[in-house]
Image (spheres, rainbow, N blue to C red):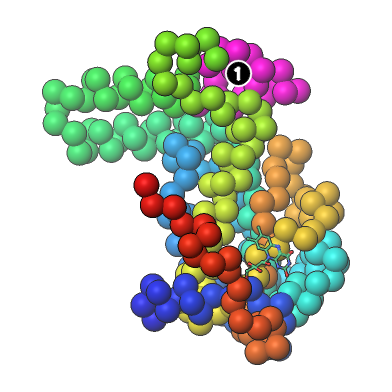
Amino acid sequence: MRLEEIINFRRSVRLYKDLPIDSEKVKHCIELATLAPNSSNMQLWEFYHITNPEILKELSAACFNQEAATTAQQMVVFVTRQDLYRKRAKKVLELETQNVLKNSPIEKHDGRIKKWKMYYGKVMPFLYVNFLGLLGIVRKVIVSIVGLFIATPYQVSESDMRVVAHKTCALAAQTFMLAMANESYDTCPMEGFDSRRVKSILKLPFGAEINMIVSCGIRDERGVWGDRMRIPFDEVYRKI
Ligand SMILES: Cc1cc2nc3c(=O)[nH]c(=O)nc-3n(C[C@H](O)[C@H](O)[C@H](O)COP(=O)(O)O)c2cc1C
């Protein structure tokens, strides 16, 4: 399929056939999902690929027994891991340093490595560190003062940083769903779930959040609810 055909093929499927799907192919689609663009390349995400029938049953119940869940062959839970910011920043700094050494002219090495050290060693920890919402307020005050003099990113509160992590994770989820469509597999993104129960089933730590659960299988035609409906394009398109 061409990209446009893949985009048209993908529908939210609420009823799957009782046919198995290849978990290696699903795993490959998750690998492709990790290539999604993501904020500062921090990759504050994890992907839980559920194939165990018992866990699928428990997750379906946590998804309020929607048919998109109860008839799914497998599920992928997209999880944000803001709490891993130090570990990820360290790893990305290592990778960026190697990248500079490999791809930049030698006279630029020191300057570029210094810049990455500043970004991943200081800026990222400053933005992601959390403490009861208070550090976000401190950040807001700082950027509001800086913003009086230069263009500044204002979205730095603790809830803003949650949005950043969820945006990134949702891009991975969409990349996954398109990759699945490319395999002629179907999916349904779900936010209808009990996040506490899902976290407990997957034994996730306190700092993890569920971004989306994507059920997977092969569509039963009754699982596609009619034609695709979108607001008329003219109402949402603004050319400037
Ligand atoms: C973040 C998100 C959460 C969603 N949650 C659910 C859900 O819990 N249950 C469901 O049946 N569909 C869910 N959907 C699917 C949407 O209803 C669907 O994408 C929309 O109606 C457009 O249809 P289409 O995906 O077939 O183009 C969700 C979609 C998104 C993006």
The magenta stretch spans residue 1: no
Q: Residue at x 64, y 37 (%)?
A: 162
In the rendered image, the vertical position of residue 143 relative to residue 102, given as above or below:
above
Q: In the picture provided, is 184 more to the left or to the right than 192?
A: left
Where does residue 181 sit, x and y in percent of width and height? 50, 76
Where, by quadrant of the figure, is residue 160 drawn? top right
**Amino acid carrying mark 1 in the image:** Lys
Q: Residue at x 59, y 77 (%)?
A: 228
In the rendered image, the vertical position of residue 127 relative to residue 103, given as above or below:
above
Q: In the picture provided, is 120 more to the left or to the right than 58?
A: left
Give the camera-side residue of 213 and 93: 213
Q: Residue at x 70, y 50 (%)?
A: 210
Give the camera-side residue of 157 and 84: 157
Q: In the picture provided, is 23 more to the left or to the right than 233?
A: right
Where, by quadrant of the figure, is residue 193 drawn? bottom right
Residue under numbered circle 1 = 140
Where does residue 94 sit, x and y in percent of width and height? 38, 33
Where does residue 180 sit, x and y in percent of width and height? 52, 73
Give the camera-side residue of 18 and 132: 132
Looking at the image, can residue 41 be seen?
A: yes
Q: Residue at x 14, y 27 (%)?
A: 106
Numbered range of the magenta stretch: 124-143
Q: In the picture provided, is 96 more to the left or to the right than 205?
A: left
State the quadrant of the N terminus: bottom left
